[in-house]
Image (cartoon, rainbow, N blue to C red):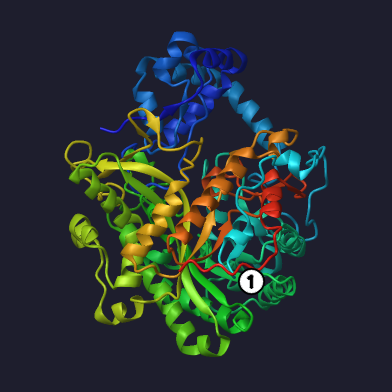
């Protein structure tokens, strides 16, 4: 059985925290989250964007009770909520009763809070009028960073651009869904996250929606200059399918084509190498209404037509294309849990939330299969119609969480490999080796679709480069969920028979509240690509660190030392991997700006630039770290391959 990861301050610190911040209202949040989002601890396939709990700061968990029901930080593994609750049924009952007693008061408080508090993004409110592009400032802006670079970084930045190979790319990222804003401006329709965040209660922790965050639709030139000022030489952005094809297919929105032409030209005019992604969990919601989206094979044709339009309109200038971003993460989250849209799952597996419809043991595999085929079809179009003339390349960006065996036993070693197969190998094995991993065929059986010979011919070898999104890790060990807990159901997340935990012998695998920062996984991941996939040319297409947002007056909004340490250590391990022969051409920091972070909303911020409620950008300490690290513009002659 897996252990719950509980980390936190010492008992004295717990008591002080309890006494100073033991607000009864937090019980309401605890119970609502627990009832809405219970998740299983022992799950090798869960996303890093897992629900989490702040310390349970209520009167009943002060002093001696704190050790019983989790005054410690509860890490965001699947099931952390249920496990912590199961550990204290009496306290839970008391908490439920308290929550019921306070429900009327809490509701009033929450209504006031959600209506009038604004942390940089709209709540469930009507769509912004086209003529009202930006809200008026109503709050004091945070102080700018002060002090010299030597004061901010007395020990330097540890690594510099000159340490990396010649031509290595350093960039940052924005996403149309997370940062663009202008939700229904110039003909754009709702994408699946626009719809989900507006209609599903609790879709994001703070009630925020993606369509009114970031404002990059209007501020793109300012944002591009931010990267130039930091010394970056590359930029990764995405296009909004729902802006280019508001109905998903059919008539092209020429306003969108004109807008993205302006954006692309501005990027290139500033000397940045451009990577463009076609899909980031944001296909038009209309496709869900028309034919259930990627559950239907029609999605393949519609995505291919959308990609064809983008290649024709922008490919003369865009030289690096990415078809899908993290589809291997989304297919499970959207079709075996209620965490991501469309929120379909088998509801009697209550640890993954209640869903109106779905089949967790079948639908993730169907969706994954169709997305792989859609990717391959788009690549086939690019290679046959555009690549030679446009002289570009095309790839895919996959989410990879490292799974470290909990012990050296053969069973745990095999479990860690199965967990990797079901997450990374699920997409990468067909794309680079022509078929699904053997472990998936064995453990998912007939529920896993098969490729035809014609499909294999298109899928196999359907990337010119690999994008890897690398952030965190868990320990994995052998465990069969179907023997006792769930003998009568099937789920993609339970199929690998690999349980996960964040601790070994009581020691966490890394540091952090929402993810574990584990720098050595950067090197191990690239070693794995080197030996499993013949050192295929790769980019680290995303790595970054989230921190909780508190208030606009908090200096921590700008002094993000945790994030600085993350980038310093991860880039150092990246450099070590390159020195050992990893075929990596560049790295992209997630993200340039604060934005809508899926189910985390704006509760966790990942930008190296802070965005306040007026949508003004402020450089964080992490941005200054990049500026100093990249300040050496010397041309490196190093080549470690």
Figure quadrant of residue 536: bottom left
Q: Position of residue 160 (x, y in %)?
A: 63, 55
Extreme-front residue of the structure: 637
Quadrant where the image shows the C terminus = bottom left
Picture layout, residue 176 above or below residue 95: below
Q: Quick one: SS at disc 1? A: strand
Number of dots carrying numbers = 1
Picture layout, residue 141 above or below residue 527: above
Which of 179 and 572 lies nearest the eye of the viewer? 572
Question: Which residue occupies 43% across, 64% down?
Answer: 581
Figure quadrant of residue 238: bottom right
Q: Is residue 491 found left or right of 327 in the rendered image?
A: left
Extreme-top residue of the structure: 64
Which of 544 and 18 lies nearest the eye of the viewer? 544
Q: Position of residue 297 (x, y in %)?
A: 37, 72
Q: Position of residue 603 (x, y in %)?
A: 60, 39
Figure quadrant of residue 148: top right
- For the question of whether residue 601 can be seen, the reply is yes
Question: Which residue occupies 66% across, 77% down?
Answer: 257
Q: Residues within 10 Å of mark 1 (few under 14, many from 20)?
A: some
Report the residue marked by disc 1. Answer: 273
Quadrant where the image shows the N terminus = top left
- For the question of whether residue 298 can be seen, the reply is no
Q: Is residue 228 found left or right of 8 in the rendered image?
A: right
Q: Position of residue 182 (x, y in %)?
A: 69, 60
């Amino acid at each position: 059985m897996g252990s719950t990861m509980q980390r936190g301050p010492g008992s004295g610190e717990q008591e002080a925290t309890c006494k100073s911040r033991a607000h009864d209202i937090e019980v309401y949040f605890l119970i609502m989250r627990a009832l809405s989002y219970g998740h299983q601890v022992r799950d090798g396939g869960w996303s890093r964007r897992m629900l989490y709990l702040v310390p349970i700061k209520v009167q009943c968990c002060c002093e001696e009770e704190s050790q019983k029901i989790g005054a410690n930080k509860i890490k965001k593994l699947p099931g952390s909520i249920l496990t912590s609750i199961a550990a204290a049924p009496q306290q839970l009952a008391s908490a439920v009763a308290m929550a019921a007693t306070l429900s009327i008061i809490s509701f009033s408080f929450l209504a006031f809070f959600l209506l009038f508090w604004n942390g940089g993004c709209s709540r469930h409110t009507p769509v912004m009028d086209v003529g009202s592009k930006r809200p008026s400032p109503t709050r004091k802006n945070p102080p700018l960073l002060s002090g010299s670079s030597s004061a901010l970084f007395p020990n330097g930045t540890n690594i510099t651009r000159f340490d990396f190979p010649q031509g290595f790319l350093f960039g940052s990222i924005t996403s149309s869904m997370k940062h663009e804003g202008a939700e229904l401006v110039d003909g754009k329709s709702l994408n699946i996250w626009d719809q989900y965040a507006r209609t599903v209660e609790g879709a994001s922790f703070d009630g925020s929606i993606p369509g009114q965050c970031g404002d990059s639709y209007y501020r793109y030139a300012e944002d591009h200059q931010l990267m130039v000022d930091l010394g970056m030489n590359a930029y990764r952005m995405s296009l909004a399918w729902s802006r280019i094809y508001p109905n998903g297919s059919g008539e092209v929105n020429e306003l969108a084509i004109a807008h993205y032409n302006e954006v692309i030209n501005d990027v290139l005019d500033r000397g940045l190498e451009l990577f463009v992604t076609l899909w980031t969990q944001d296909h038009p919601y209309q496709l869900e209404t028309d034919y259930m989206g990627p559950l239907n094979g029609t999605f393949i044709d519609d995505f291919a037509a959308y990609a064809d339009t983008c290649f024709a309109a922008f490919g003369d200038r865009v030289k690096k294309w990415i078809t899908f971003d993290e589809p291997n993460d989304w297919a499970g989250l959207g079709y075996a849990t209620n965490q991501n849209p469309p929120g379909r799952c088998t509801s009697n597996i209550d640890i993954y939330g209640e869903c109106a419809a779905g089949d967790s043991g079948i639908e993730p595999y169907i969706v994954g299969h169709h997305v792989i085929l859609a990717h391959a079809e788009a690549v086939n179009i690019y290679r046959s119609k555009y690549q030679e003339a446009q002289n570009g390349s095309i790839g895919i960006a996959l989410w990879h969480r490292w799974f470290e065996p909990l012990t050296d036993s053969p069973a745990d070693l095999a479990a860690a490999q199965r967990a990797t197969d079901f997450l990374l190998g699920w997409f990468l094995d067909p794309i680079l080796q022509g078929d699904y991993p053997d472990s998936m065929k064995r453990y998912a059986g007939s529920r896993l679709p098969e490729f035809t010979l014609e499909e294999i011919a298109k899928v196999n070898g359907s990337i010119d480069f690999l994008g890897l999104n690398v952030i965190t890790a868990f320990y994995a060990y052998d465990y069969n969920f179907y023997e006792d807990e769930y003998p009568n159901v099937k789920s993609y997340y339970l199929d690998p028979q690999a349980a996960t935990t964040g601790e070994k012998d009581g020691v966490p695998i890394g540091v952090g509240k929402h993810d574990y920062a584990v720098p050595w996984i950067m090197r191990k991941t690239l070693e794995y690509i080197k030996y499993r996939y013949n050192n295929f040319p790769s980019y680290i297409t995303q790595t970054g660190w989230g921190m909780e947002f508190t208030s606009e007056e908090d200096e921590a909004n700008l002094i993000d030392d945790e994030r600085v340490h993350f980038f310093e250590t991860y880039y150092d391990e990246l450099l070590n991997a390159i020195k050992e022969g990893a075929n990596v051409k560049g790295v992209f920091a997630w993200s340039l700006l604060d934005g809508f972070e899926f189910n985390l909303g704006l509760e966790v911020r990942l930008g190296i630039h802070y965005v306040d409620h007026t949508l003004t950008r402020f450089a964080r300490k992490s941005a200054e770290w990049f500026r100093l690290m990249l300040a050496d513009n010397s041309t490196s002659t190093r080549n470690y391959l």
